[in-house]
Image (tube, rainbow, N blue to C red):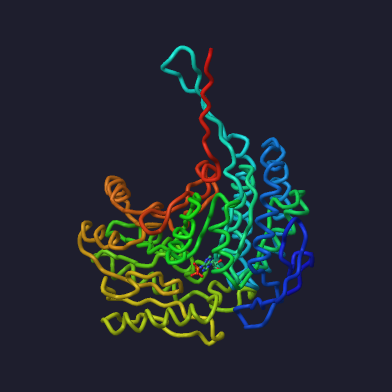
Amino acid sequence: MQLTYPALLQQGIFINNNWQTGAATFPVYNPANGEVITNVYNAGVAETEQAIQAADAAFPAWSNKPAKERSDILKKWYQLIIQHSNDLALLLTTEQGKPLTEAKGEVQYGASFIEWFAEECRRTYGQVIPAPVADRRFFTIKQPIGVVAAITPWNFPIAMITRKIAPALAAGCTVVLKPAEDTPLCALALAQLAKEAGLPAGVLNVITTLQAAETGKLLTTHPAVHKISFTGSTEVGRILMQQSSSTLKKLSLELGGNAPAIVFNDADLQQAVKGTLASKYRNAGQTCVCANRVLVQKDIYPAFMKAYQEAVMAMQVGNGTTDGVTIGPLINQDAIDKIQKLLKDAFDKGAELLCGGKVHSAGPLFFEPTIITHCTPEMELSREEIFGPVSAVYVFETVEEAIALANNTEYGLAAYFFSKDVQQVWRIAEQLQYGIIGINEGIISFAEVPFGGIKQSGYGKEGSFYGIEDYLITKYLCLGGI
Ligand code: ADP
């Protein structure tokens, strides 16, 4: 990997704007070929404590800066990310695997949250409330909640970070970030650019670690940390919530999904194929909003399946840096094992293979774009996130059946459906128990809109004007003696 700006490749633990070493290191692998890209320092509990102290010490000055000054620094950071976007995309593909075009898209998308919240922080208005008594006046003001701990996953090594820390920093909070152990390099590159943008020491601290449980325990129980923002599995979300109860921290949890993509008889075929394909196979199926279940109505089923299979089989599997590749490797062997386990269970219970179904010849972490049909709710993949390039297809006859199938999950993050009937569109959008609904569209994430789930997909919103609210407290002032 040849970066034009080598300072973006860092190995240190980032505390107080310094790159620190640690007692040990751990390797970061390129999932496309298994090569070690570099080794990074492994932060332990001691470094985590140091990072929390640094964030705590930086909070008064940062939170008291006028919003305009924080905004200017964030805008500079945004510009630096755009300026170095090719390097960042290459770094992203190298440690995470997604095709370079998708990585470039993620850099832009990730940066857009910094731009957006640099603007939003200048509009965190309070209120003047009419009082029911003559001698008092009521107001609310918005203030940053305090030190924020952000714990992020590997599937979007830039965007999952900026979605959290841009609103946090914009609001006036300081941050300890713990990126995923599979993809720490993008996080460190972002920190380097934040420093160059003029972010004061201690405002953003990054601890790379293999000791997720120990550092997570400290972050969730430390009295100086006031908010946890987590994206990852529902299982880990539950642990963090439990641990946070000892100090009653505010939580934002963006957890697992089990998105249905529903194709109704009256759907525009091209839109349905394009939308489902984009939702399902983006990032090789490794997103929490990927279509986990494709529900197709009986009459459109033959035509849809023919077009969908053609589109799936046209996808190019390979190293993400190779031109034309649309499906890169999965993140690690666990991901491959999980898919194979889910497929075996589905076949044992009657599923049929339409295409794909096995590890691809490109290497041990590549999986063929796969479609299986005759899926039923009894199969494990109806309940669990597949997180790989596998479409599980179900057939339904009535609208009621589709809604019941779609809502038959503990999760409630994203759902998609394809229909041209305006009345049906409205009814179904209301009946789907999900926080995000894509209607005739498979790509739904933007900095301007509220991203977040319901049910066991968690709570809190990222992006939009709601996104900064999660990092603010509303303080009520009562002025008496008027
Ligand atoms: P995924 O299945 O996407 O890897 P995880 O929930 O396991 O999801 O991981 C998401 C993030 O949570 C990663 O940064 C990981 O290191 C971190 N993590 C995993 N286990 C814990 C834990 N017990 N406490 C705190 N963070 C954790």
Q: Is residue 75 visible in the rendered structure shown here? A: yes
- Residue at the image point whose x is 53% and y is 27% from the top: 477
Residue placed most toward the observer, 469 or 85? 469
**Percent of width and height locating residue 439:** 38, 52
Q: Quadrant of residue 49?
A: bottom right
> For this view, does 398 lie left or right of residue 329?
left
Number of on-image labels: 0
**Percent of width and height locating residue 205:** 68, 57
In the rendered image, the quadrant that contains the N terminus is bottom right
In the rendered image, the vertical position of residue 242 relative to residue 394, given as above or below: above
- Residue at the image point whose x is 64% and y is 53% from the top: 175
Q: Quadrant of residue 303?
A: bottom left
> For this view, does 97 lie left or right of residue 401?
right
Residue placed most toward the observer, 338 or 469? 469
**Percent of width and height locating residue 325:** 57, 74
In the rendered image, the vertical position of residue 56 relative to residue 18, given as above or below: above
Residue placed most toward the observer, 452 or 173? 173
